[in-house]
Image (cartoon, rainbow, N blue to C red):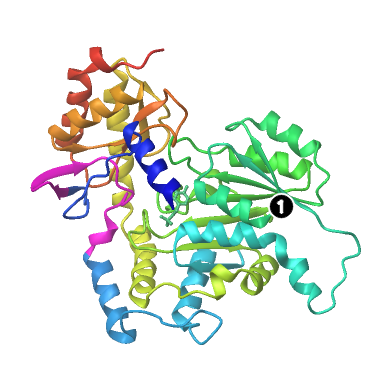
Amino acid sequence: MKEFKEIAEWIEARGAVHEIPRVESLPQPGFRMDGADHVSFSTNNYLGLSSHPRMIAAARTGLERYGVGNCESRLLGGDLDIYDQLEQKLAAMKGKDTALLFATGYLTNLGVLSSLVKAGQFARIYGYRARNRHSYAFFTDEYNHVSIREGIRLSGADRLTYRHLDLDHLDSLLAGSSATSKVIVTDGVFSQDGDIAPLPDLLAVAERHDAMVYVDDAHGTGVLGASGGGITEHFGLHDERLICMGTLSKAYGAIGGFVATDRHIGELLRLTCSAYGFTSTLPPDQVYAVSEAIDIVADEPARRQRLWDNQRYFVAAMRDLPYRLVSTTTPIVPVLIGDEARTDHLSALLREAGLHVDSVKFPAVARNQGRLRVILNAGHTRAQIDRLVGVFRDNQDRFLAAA
Ligand code: PMP
């Protein structure tokens, strides 16, 4: 017991405990904090759907028809018809045969990556004997989301980490592996850097090594592509090597996760993935809300248009200032500050001005790579963006990142 107290006090003494703001309402993108109005430049509610009247009406219908929660797991009496309908809609959106719903995006990565390797093991219970021994290896970008890293760890398979977006490094790791099933795993949009994985190039590498590609499209779904279909639509890709994962908690404004796959992988995951079958899943109101969100994204393209207009407006204004932007191709536009204390200091000044921007530092990113992770939103006004740029401008001499 004693070591927990000792470690907790040691960490606290070094100021390593991040202060987490407690909020009194959710960002739309305006919200209440410490009894005052603020504007969030950090919300994943990209299109403002979480408070859309159609979403609330849909959720209410689900609530009234089915009650508050599903107290059964999917494989034991809780397999509601509305799950199947939503899965079909998600699969169609991603151009895949089938989709599986999960309670959260985090659980999706944990569950799918850890059980992909278990198909043969499961079939052996029924007497299956593989002609050749299967061995699995995951090839993972160093900046992938923590749920990917945890899912791979749980699988027990080999994990080979390649340098961020370094396809030559990936290629050499694949060439050196003797695994019979190779899976490349990547974020679609990287959550701390905001850059987009070069999916066509990753697929070309995968083709050369007969590998699959698992893409976590948490930040792309509803945001990228001509109709919000995500990273695959953005690049115009349909490929049987692809497994597409997404969350329902960002642009879709609700909660949950999903993976869209070909028929065989989907069928096997329904059997082997305990995070799918042996836990209570989405409450019905969330299923109704997500289904409505997919329709709203299609019916109201003006929302995505506003999001991208705001993104371009912010990037153009920041280009006149001497800050370094980590990337400028998605609504996540991190402003590099470098030193952790200076990053926190500028974040505090922004907060005093009623603007909330996440301060992202070690260990979420490398040391001295502290950044203010600006996330643009469809609901931002030009005046709000001008205010944000104004604070950066007023403080540029004090907070510029060391080159
Ligand atoms: N993947 C990525 C890339 C993410 O950014 C997140 C959320 N931060 C998740 C997965 C987890 O999604 P959820 O919040 O729905 O569990």
Which quarter shows the C terminus? Answer: top left
The quadrant holding residue 162 is top right
- Residue situated in front as seen by the camera: 341 or 284: 341
Q: Residue furthest right?
A: 131
Residue 91 coordinates in the image, percent (x, y): 54, 65
| Residue that badge 1 annotates | 157
Helix, strand or loop for disc 1: loop
Does the stretch in magenta take in 61?
A: no
Q: Residue furthest front?
A: 2
Q: Does ligand 1 reach within 8 Å of label 1's beta carbon? A: no
- Residue situated in front as seen by the camera: 296 or 197: 197
Does the stretch in magenta take in 33?
A: yes
Q: Height in image: 367 above or below 236?
A: above
- Residue situated in front as seen by the camera: 363 or 204: 363
Residue 92 coordinates in the image, percent (x, y): 53, 65
Disc 1 crowd rating (10 Å Cα; few below 14, some 14-19, many 20+) is: some
Residue 22 coordinates in the image, percent (x, y): 21, 49
Image point (80%, 48%), residue name: 179
Kind of residue indicated by mark 1: Ala
Residue 152 coordinates in the image, percent (x, y): 62, 51
Q: Height in image: 172 above or below 125?
A: above
Q: Is residue 347 visible?
A: yes
Residue bounds of the magenta highlight:
31-52
The quadrant holding residue 6 is top left
Q: Height in image: 12 above or below 64?
A: above
Left or right: 21 as drawn, with respect to 360: left
Left or right: 316 as drawn, with respect to 80: left
